[in-house]
Image (spheres, rainbow, N blue to C red):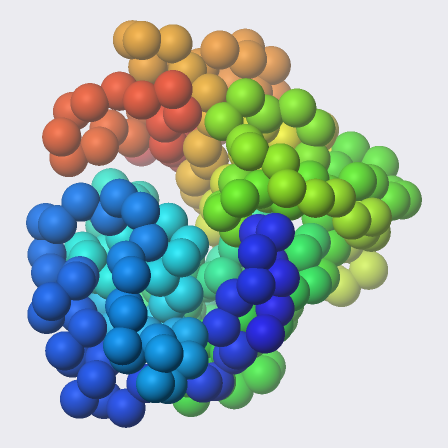
Amino acid sequence: MSKSGGKVSPAVGVYYPRIVETLIRQIWFRPRIPAGKARRLGLIERMMGRRRIRVLTRPGFLFACDQTDWLQRNLLCNRIHEQEVTEQLTAVFRSDDIFFDVGANTGYFSCLALCSGVAGVTAFEPDPDTCVVMNGQRQLNGWDEAALSIVPMGLSDENGHQQLIRGSDSGESGFGDWPHREPVGRIEVEVITLDEYCRQAGRYPSILKIDVEGWEYPVLRGAAAVLQNPTLRLVVFETACDAKGIITDPRLPELLEQAGFTVSHLPRPSGRIKPTENYLALRGTD
């Protein structure tokens, strides 16, 4: 079992029998049931232990969920994560795209890209335990190792090492101060600039997704050459905003606009504005 997110998670590749998974989803994780807190599965867990629960997501790929993690529990209930981002990316992915997933966590958006038939995915995730889980999602769906390159490093504005602060949920882990994180531990991890990674790998993204819990500016600052590269046509990123949906760190849109992108808010289906929202940076104005 891994300890990603500061707690012990069910082992990768260990699942309940299909009929048990179906029962669990129908009783505890039906659509529109609030994700809330982890469910007490009682007799099932006492008999079989804690295992991952497989779900067929609405985009069409399988995902093995640890129901004690909020994002994965939400997938069990609703079969989709960040609907507005999922729909946007699904609509724009092309067969020749190289998708970079920065702050990939357990790999939902990496799986979405592969399910959509892109040419390749590079996923950056600094927590080694979470990388193991992401690789398990790749294996579950039968994708080749060459299709998903998992980079066990964080991105920043300089190369070196950084303290990764693990959150109570794996999606809250990250670098620096972030007010929405409940810290449960720290590990030292390697970091690299996106420019340096691309220079070494000889691989550049056409679509870039960034979800790094308040660390957006160091990531973009270390990606000056990548942002200027005409291959990159779209950046989707999550960042803090005010009650009107205006990005609170003006350096982010400034960096992107200087590189030729137009930045716009990607609203949630509900229209509600939360303290962090998703944004699109599209090259040019078309």
- 90 vs 146: above or below: above
What is the total number of numbered labels drawn onto the structure image?
A: 0
Whether residue 132 is visible, yes or no, is yes
Q: Quadrant of the N terminus?
A: bottom right
Residue extending farthest right: 160
The quadrant in which the C terminus is found is top left
- Residue at 42% from the left image edge and 54% from the top image edge: 69
Residue 264 visible in the picture:
no
Q: Image quarter for residue 55?
A: bottom left
Give the residue displayed 62% in from the left and 62% down from the top: 3
Q: Name the one closer to the observer, 194 or 203.
A: 194
The picture places residue 256, in percent across and down from the top left corner, at 55, 25
Is 11 drawn above or below residue 206 in the view shown?
Answer: below
Front-lying residue, 228 or 112: 112
Q: Report whether 138 appears left or right of 151.
A: left
Q: Tell me where residue 282 appears, x and y as whole percent.
A: 41, 34
> Can you say whether 110 is above or below 45 in the image?
above
Q: Residue at x 11, y 60 (%)?
A: 30
Quarter residue 21 falls in: bottom left
